[in-house]
Image (cartoon, rainbow, N blue to C red):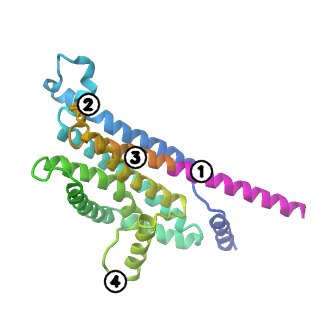
Amino acid sequence: MPAKTVVSSSTDKAQHGFFPYARYTSVVGVHTSLVAFTALFLPQTSLLLWPSLADPDRPETQFKDALTNNPVITLAWIVAGLVVLQVWWAGWIRHWCFEYTSRAVSSDQMKVDRYQFNRGRFSKLGRVAVFTSCVALVFHATIILFGAPSASHLPHTFLLAIVLALLSVFAPAYALGYPSFSSDTSSFITRLNWTRLFAELSPRNPIERALVYPAVATLFGAWLGAFPIALDWDRPWQAWPLTPLFGGITGYIVGSLSALSVSALKWLAEENIRREQSEKQKTT
């Protein structure tokens, strides 16, 4: 009887679109704030380690100079910070994905699933890191095809590609699995999910929106960020690839907050409909 009650309760949650919105909101707020901090303030560490980088004639622009004096160092600091942040964020997404898919099973089955879930996280993290590195190589080639310098600035372009890969594919690969060319059923389902999410752009639940919106906004923001480079202003912040870098990071933050807003609005609408249906049932 208790097991039956657990299954019934879990099924009710599944039918009502159960999702930890309060925890999701707090984690998204912390994550986006730390991403912004990583982009703007972590490169300032260069001035603490190498004070000679600061320009004594322009003390009021030290904050901006730390970002623009050496784009490679700026990119390296941001990559280091994003590696930590994206592993943490992807862990949350993967945990919510597990909760979301296991909400209608019995408690005994959930214990087995949770054991397998926890046992394979580190090995999966390594495979996802390799997959993200491969995607970074693809992004690197694509950026060059879009007009980036091919004979120079190779470290700049590759570090930009790593940033875009970390922001766009690392979390989806860790939470949903990465697409492969294997012929088994699981790989086929994973390929279908990636096609639906990132080719058709049709997320169906809050977790999928939290993965799709930031990824698309990151690439779109990086593409928009490339336009100021063509302006003949000769400003330090126009050095390659600073504007695509910060355009992609801005897009990621906007996409994350947009996913949160859309999911919250949908949840409020569903709650309102559910409340109206409950009141109708009581009156009848």
Numbered tag placed on residue 251 in the rendering: 3
Give the mark, 2 or 3, whose residue is nearer the N terminus.
Answer: 2
Q: In the visual, does 71 lie left or right of 226?
A: left
Q: Which mark is residue 22?
A: none
Compared to 55, does 69 lie above or below?
Answer: below
Q: Which residues are magenta?
A: 259-284
Please say if the residues under marks 4 and 2 sit with CB atoms less than 8 Å apart. no
**Amino acid type, callout 3:** Gly
Q: Earlier in the sequence, mark 4 or mark 1?
A: 4
Q: Secondary structure at mark 4?
A: loop
Q: Secondary structure at mark 2?
A: helix
Residue holding disc 4: 183
Residue 278 position by quadrant: bottom right
Q: Which residue is mark 1?
A: 264
Residue at position x 35%, y 59% in the image: 169
Badge 4 or badge 3: first in the primary sequence: 4
